[in-house]
Image (spheres, rainbow, N blue to C red):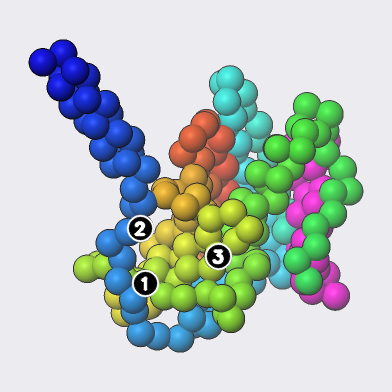
Amino acid sequence: MPIFRTRFLLLSSFLLVLAGCSSVYKNLKPAEGNIREIKKFAPDFTNVLYKTEVDVIGGHHLSGLLLIKTLPDKSVRMVFSNEMGFKFFDFEFKPDGGFKVYYIIKQMDKRPVIITLQKDFELVMMCKQNPETGYMRQDNSFLYYVFPQERGANYYITNKAGTDLIRMERSSDRKPVVQAIMHNFHDGIPDTIGISHKNFKFNIGLKRLKR
């Protein structure tokens, strides 16, 4: 009897582990459509300024202004500073997928932090969308435009008609690790952007400032 009970407990534990490892995307079904259509939601960051709030693990908070500007070579320059002009970081995103750090404050100058910020903003700017490897899925409510990455994938989720961008997700193989939203587009520029991490506290909120 003890042996049977032990085997039963081991089997139960194994099944629980398997259940915990299942993907939240496993029930999505193939969808018809043009994967390139998602590009119509790509923000036009020609020259825009956002009031920015950043909350990070440990209760730390940063606030200031984020300037996003597209350069003549189509690179995107992104500078985050406080209201007095003190810079927190200065990044450049190249049209070929390259990324350059011009400056970052010492407290943030850690490879995991830089990579996290890079991938977060690439998700929002809709960089690294390869239509040759991308594919579409659906459930009862939404369309999913899926672009595999080196690890996991970027998901862009719209309503079934493909007319409204609901949210964006950067995922592992099993579940979202980052979710982002863009709302209230005017002239191709979203007034509101939100980025939220699921495994640790790191949230970014952007509100467009009129100039």
Distance from disc 3 to disc 1, alpha carbons, whole Å, reads: 13 Å
Q: Are marks 2 and 1 in contact (CB under 8 Å)?
A: yes
Q: Which mark is residue 25?
A: 2
Which segment did they paint magenta?
69-95
Q: Quadrant of the C terminus?
A: bottom right
> Is 94 left or right of 145, judged from the image as shown?
right
Q: Which residue is pictured at 36% across the width and 51% down the height?
A: 23
- Pick the front one: 120 or 191: 120
* Residue 181 painted magenta: no
Name the amino acid, label 1.
Answer: Arg
Q: Position of residue 40 (x, y in %)?
A: 53, 79
Q: Position of residue 57 (x, y in %)?
A: 57, 25
* Residue 80 painted magenta: yes
Q: State which tag comes first along the sequence, 3 or 1.
A: 1
Rate crowding at label 1 as few (under 14), some (14 to 19) or many (20 or more) other CA atoms within 10 Å: some
Q: Position of residue 84 (x, y in %)?
A: 80, 35
Give the answer, above or below, for where 60 lies relative to 24.
Answer: above
Confirm whether residue 182 shows in the render: no
Q: Which residue is pictured at 30% across the width and 34% down the height?
A: 14
Q: Which residue is pictured at 60% across the width and 71% down the height?
A: 129
Residue identifier under label 3? 148
> Is 4 left or right of 53, judged from the image as shown?
left
Question: SS class of the residue under badge 3?
Answer: strand
Rate crowding at label 3 as few (under 14), some (14 to 19) or many (20 or more) other CA atoms within 10 Å: some
Q: Position of residue 34 (x, y in %)?
A: 45, 86
Name the amino acid, label 3.
Answer: Pro
Residue 123, quarter of picture: bottom right
Question: SS class of the residue under badge 1?
Answer: strand
Distance from disc 2 to disc 1, alpha carbons, whole Å, reads: 9 Å
Q: State which tag comes first along the sequence, 2 or 1.
A: 2
> Is 32 left or right of 203, judged from the image as shown?
left
